[in-house]
Image: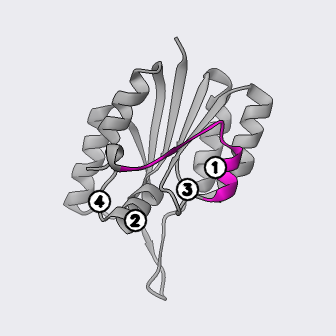
Amino acid sequence: MKTIAIFADVQNIYYTTRDAYGRQFNYRELWKQLSAEGKIVIANAYATQKGDDKQHKFQKALEHIGFKVKLKPYIQRSDGSAKGDWDVGITIDVMDKAKEVDVVVLLSGDGDFDLLLEKIKTDYGVTAKVYGVPGLTAKTLIEVSSVYHPIEENLLI
């Protein structure tokens, strides 16, 4: 049985599914699909912490599914934009865990992760699966992945 590690860039998936479809990603359905492919041994969801009730309920739902939720403070910049970047944290965790599993699943469309996936495929021989929204997932990330799964109707709520 294959061992699977999931790393979910929650902010990226939230905004890309909202922008493309006006809907939310179905983490429960993803878990169901991946569980059918092997044993999920690690599942991290990286998010920002604003402290509102809706967000807290969502994080509890992720934990109930089986994710470990990792939070960073939500930072509001003076220009009105927000920051809650988890790229380095995700990279460290993927590098740390990729040597222990057969499959790494990355939920993100962020092209900054293309070098990471290339490295873990080369160094550890893992399968690198990417789930991202078509048209909002970096071409380089799709190209470097072992398998690209477009987020479409079957993975939306």
- The span from disc 1 to disc 4 (Cα, nearest Å) is 22 Å
Q: Tell me the distance, in whole angstroms, between the alpha carbons under discs 1 and 2.
A: 17 Å
Q: Which residue is mark 1?
A: 142
**Identity of the residue drawn at 48% across and 87% down:** 78
Task: Give the mark, 1 or 2, whose residue is nearer the N terminus.
Answer: 2
Tell me: 31 left or right of 108. left
Distance, label 3 to label 2, CA atoms, is 12 Å
Q: Which of the marked residues, 3 or 2, is nearer the chain's N terminus? A: 2
Determine which quarter of the picture holds residue 86. bottom right
Q: How many marks?
A: 4
User: Residue 73 sits in which quadrant?
Assistant: bottom left
Report the span colored magenta: 138-152
Q: Is residue 114 above or below residue 37?
A: below
| Spot occupied by residue 53 in the image (x, y as percentages of width and height) | 20, 59
Crowdedness of circle 3 by 10 Å Cα count: few (<14), some, many (20+)? many
Q: Are marks 3 and 2 in contact (CB under 8 Å)?
A: no
Q: In this rendered view, identify the residue nearer to me: 138 or 122.
A: 138
Of residues 100 and 136, the one nearer the viewer is 136
Label 3 close to label 1 by CB (< 8 Å): no
Residue occupied by mark 4: 23
Residue 15 locus on image (x, y percent) = 41, 64
Give residue 109's mark: 3
For label 2, the crowd category at 10 Å Cα-Cα, with few meaning under 14, some 14 to 19 and many 20 or more, is some
- The amino acid pointed to by label 3 is Gly
What SS does tag 3 mark?
loop
Give x and y (percent) for residue 63.
31, 37
Q: Residue 66 lies in magenta, yes or no?
A: no
Residue 20 circle label: 2
